[in-house]
């Protein structure tokens, strides 16, 4: 054991907490009592969307369409099918009309279009058809819409499935809440068992769980209040639970372990002071690195990412606060009773195990360093094949209504019918002049000629057999002439200065072919004084991913620079922080490769219980980077703190690395095991984004705590030698005074 004076502000804070332990405990009990009644309201307070921005062209197109037509393009779809009837049968058609009779009279409904109005809403096999119920309100207002809609939809004698954006949002909320309950049921027993194996005492094992649970509960209460003034995504719910439990238990594990280590040779007050001056300080700096990573998410304009950053930052801050105030108060009250109710015998770790590992690694430092580096790079290479997409019903399990409707439409109509490309055309004055209609016809004809296009629904593409001149003749009467189909299409798609062009492609919305088609359309000139915006599913995917990765460099620079500065202050070296940044990045890149192999390409899909998406949700790598960068830095801080403590006591570089790994290796492994267990519990989630986040976090933390900390860090520190501790004098003069002890 390496002794340090540890007489710094953290030591004084620890002794102050010891003296005021009951007051500190009372404050936390009061805060928890305030938060707990709010927790059951958290799901209803959160929003299911948050992946859109009004500044994107695809979203501006939605706004123009809604303003011109008085409806939101994200409509409700009622899908009809029958094992005995075809859509042309009168009984099939009358069943559709009967089911929608009350729907047509609802105030919230802007338009109802049935297969009788538009024959293109009948599948090629004739046995499946759908009706479009266009809504006046935004799909996010589904809580008010769905109950009324479901009460008004009457039996039809046909098989009916309702899908569309409002159903999707409702299913997201329900499935996310279900996923969280399942993850808690899985993670709590395993985390408790892991703590029991580490401490061997029921009391010592229960204390970290209490601290982590308190941080989560208080955060959820705060999130409910914040959701009243700003949009908080429902996906923040799982992140709060995963981080709160993982970090709260992790931080408590380090503090409790150091307190128990100091108790045999000190009074409880002094033991708590030393624990705070060492492990407590490491917890604070570790928490700062995680906090910084999550703050990077707040810089994005998408509400889903911002809310993850807000809620994640809060739970990290509260985890640190609980670990450095509530936990010391509990330890002060318990004292030696921290080991009460022992159920496992005290079995000290095998002496010299991690010391021997470090020495063996450092004897072959070059071979180990480049070998591990090559393995991590190889694990990350599949990320070069990544395809980005945006959330749709495919992220949900097959048993929910919106996913069932999504699959049914895709099977019956093909990929393009699910997410058509929408072109919102506007004109400074009437676009019904013969000249403008001719220009519009030529524009649509160029799009129709593209082999990636299945069909185009517009007022100038009523039927491929109708010529340009015939279309112009039809619209010589501005109401659509005498043809009933032309009148129906005109009324659905057109106003005097606006028309909507709907393009159904031959490929899925996230494929390269569909993305290239959208880009080609956006580069197709229109003319005639008219302008247009391109929206729809594929356009939204392009705009969403492009904007995310335009903003990411700003967040990346903020995270890297701020984290480097914090580590520079802690370690007083310009080399160690740089090496820590590189080590973290390697483990994260390896987890990225796993995401592509598993969730895009489908490896282990049957084992993990999901259908591969064929793409990676575009925000997932960014969210994972911001979460994992700080989370992985936790273990770097704890390990390097111990190494620095040894080096400051007079050991040379090689001896201090071996001593630091010996003193922190078991704890880091135990702490990482708990985070891996908590993260892995979210792999059981039905929402694929949550499943991917849980698996990616578990893989990154596992690699980080074993391969990176056990092999790569000792090898790299041996290769750098005394350069690890180098900093120019000019830099040292700018830094705060030495902060004292370590872990």
Image: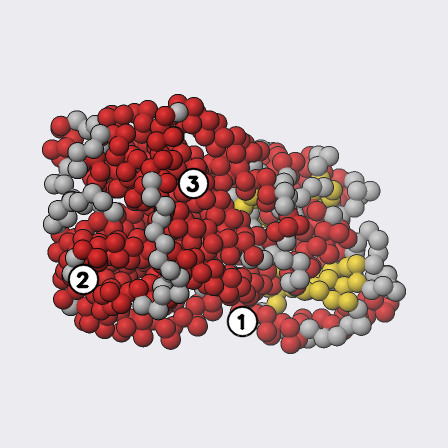
Which structural element holds mark 1?
A: helix
Judge whether residue 601 can be spotted in this image.
yes
Q: Which residue is mark 1?
A: 144
Q: Which mark is residue 268?
A: 2
Which structural element holds mark 3?
A: helix
Which structural element holds mark 2?
A: helix
Q: Position of residue 492 (x, y in %)?
A: 67, 57
Measured along the vertical axis of the image, is residue 156 above or below residue 196? below
Q: Earlier in the sequence, mark 1 or mark 3?
A: 1
State the residue at coordinates (77%, 67%). Answer: 159
Assess whether mark 3 and mark 1 are in contact (beta carbons under 8 angstroms).
no
Quadrant (top left/top right/bottom left/bottom right) for the N terminus: top left
Q: What is the C-alpha distance between the residues marked 3 and 2?
A: 33 Å
Q: Work out whether residue 480 or residue 31 is closer to the camera in this orientation and state it.
A: 31
Q: Which mark is residue 706?
A: 3
Left or right: 51 as drawn, with respect to 631 = right
Q: Earlier in the sequence, mark 3 or mark 2?
A: 2
Callout in the foreground (1, 2):
2
Q: Earlier in the sequence, mark 1 or mark 2?
A: 1
Q: Position of residue 563 (x, y in %)?
A: 29, 40
Residue 709, image quadrant: top left
Q: What is the C-alpha distance between the residues marked 1 and 3?
A: 50 Å
State the residue at coordinates (13%, 28%). Answer: 730
Measured along the vertical axis of the image, is residue 13 above or below residue 628? below
Left or right: 313 as drawn, with respect to 397 = left
């Amino acid at each position: 054991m390496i002794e340090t004076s540890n007489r710094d502000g953290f030591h004084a804070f620890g002794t102050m907490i010891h003296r005021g332990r009951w007051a500190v405990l009372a404050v936390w009990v009061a805060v928890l009592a305030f938060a707990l009644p709010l927790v059951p309201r958290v799901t209803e307070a959160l929003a299911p969307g948050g992946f859109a921005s009004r500044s994107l062209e695809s979203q501006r197109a939605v706004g123009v369409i809604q303003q011109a037509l008085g409806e939101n393009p994200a409509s409700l779809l009622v899908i009809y099918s029958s094992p005995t009837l075809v859509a042309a049968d009168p009984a099939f058609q009358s069943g559709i009309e009967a089911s929608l009779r009350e729907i047509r009279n609802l105030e919230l409904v802007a338009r109802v279009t049935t297969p009788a109005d538009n024959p293109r809403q009948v599948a090629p096999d004739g046995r499946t058809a759908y009706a479009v119920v266009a809504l006046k309100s935004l799909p996010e207002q589904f809580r008010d819409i769905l109950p009324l809609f479901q009460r008004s939809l009457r039996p039809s004698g046909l098989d009916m499935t309702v899908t569309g954006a409002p159903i999707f949002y409702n299913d997201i909320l329900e499935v996310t809440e279900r996923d969280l309950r399942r993850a808690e049921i899985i993670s709590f027993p395993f985390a408790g068992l892991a703590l029991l194996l580490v401490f061997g005492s029921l009391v010592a094992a229960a204390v970290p769980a209490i601290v982590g649970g308190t941080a989560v509960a208080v955060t959820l209460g705060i999130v409910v209040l914040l959701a009243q003034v700003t949009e908080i995504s429902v996906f923040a719910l799982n992140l709060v639970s995963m981080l709160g439990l993982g970090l709260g238990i992790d931080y408590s594990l380090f503090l409790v372990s150091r307190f128990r280590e100091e108790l045999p040779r000190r009074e409880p007050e002094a033991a708590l002071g030393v624990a705070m001056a060492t492990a407590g300080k490491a917890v604070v700096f570790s928490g700062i690195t995680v906090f910084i990573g999550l703050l990077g998410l707040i810089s994005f304009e998408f509400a889903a990412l911002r809310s993850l950053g807000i809620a994640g930052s809060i739970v990290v801050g509260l985890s640190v606060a609980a670990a450095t105030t509530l936990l010391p108060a509990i330890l002060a009250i318990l004292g030696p009773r921290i080991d009460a109710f022992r159920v496992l015998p005290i079995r000290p770790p095998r002496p010299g195990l991690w010391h021997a590992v470090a020495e063996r690694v450092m004897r072959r430092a070059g071979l180990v360093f480049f070998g591990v580096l090559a393995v991590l790079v190889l694990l990350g290479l599949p990320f070069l094949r990544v395809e980005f997409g945006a959330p749709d019903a495919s992220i949900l399990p097959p048993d929910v209504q919106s996913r069932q409707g999504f699959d049914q439409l895709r099977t019956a109509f093909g990929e393009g019918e699910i997410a058509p490309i929408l072109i919102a055309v506007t004109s400074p004055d009437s676009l019904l002049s013969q000249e403008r209609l001719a220009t519009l016809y030529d524009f649509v004809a160029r799009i129709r000629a593209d082999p990636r296009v299945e069909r185009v629904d517009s007022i100038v593409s009523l039927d491929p057999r109708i010529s340009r001149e015939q279309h112009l003749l039809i619209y010589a009467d501005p109401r659509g002439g005498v043809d009933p189909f032309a009148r129906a299409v005109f009324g659905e798609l057109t106003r005097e200065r606006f028309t909507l062009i709907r393009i159904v492609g031959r490929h899925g919305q996230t494929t390269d072919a569909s993305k290239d088609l959208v880009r080609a359309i956006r580069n197709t000139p229109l003319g005639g004084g008219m302008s247009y915006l391109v929206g729809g599913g594929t356009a939204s995917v392009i705009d969403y991913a492009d904007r995310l990765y335009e903003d990411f460099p700003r967040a990346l620079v903020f995270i890297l620079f701020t984290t480097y500065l914090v580590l520079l202050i802690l370690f007083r070296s310009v080399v160690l922080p740089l090496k820590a940044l590189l080590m973290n990045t390697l483990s994260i890149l390896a987890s990225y490769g796993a995401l592509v192999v598993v969730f895009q390409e489908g490896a282990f899909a049957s084992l993990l219980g999901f259908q591969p998406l064929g793409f990676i949700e575009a925000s997932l790598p960014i969210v994972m980077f911001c979460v994992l960068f700080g989370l992985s830095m936790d273990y770097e801080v704890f390990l390097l703190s111990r190494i620095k403590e040894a080096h400051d006591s007079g050991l040379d570089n090689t001896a201090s690395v071996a001593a630091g790994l010996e003193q922190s290796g078991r704890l880091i492994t135990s702490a990482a095991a708990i985070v891996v267990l908590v993260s892995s519990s979210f792999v059981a989630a039905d929402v694929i984004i949550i499943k991917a986040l849980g698996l990616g976090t578990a893989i990154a933390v596992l690699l980080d705590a074993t391969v990176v900390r056990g092999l790569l860090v000792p090898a790299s520190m041996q290769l750098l030698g005394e350069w690890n501790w180098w900093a120019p004098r000019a830099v040292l003069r700018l830094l705060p005074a030495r902060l004292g002890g370590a872990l």
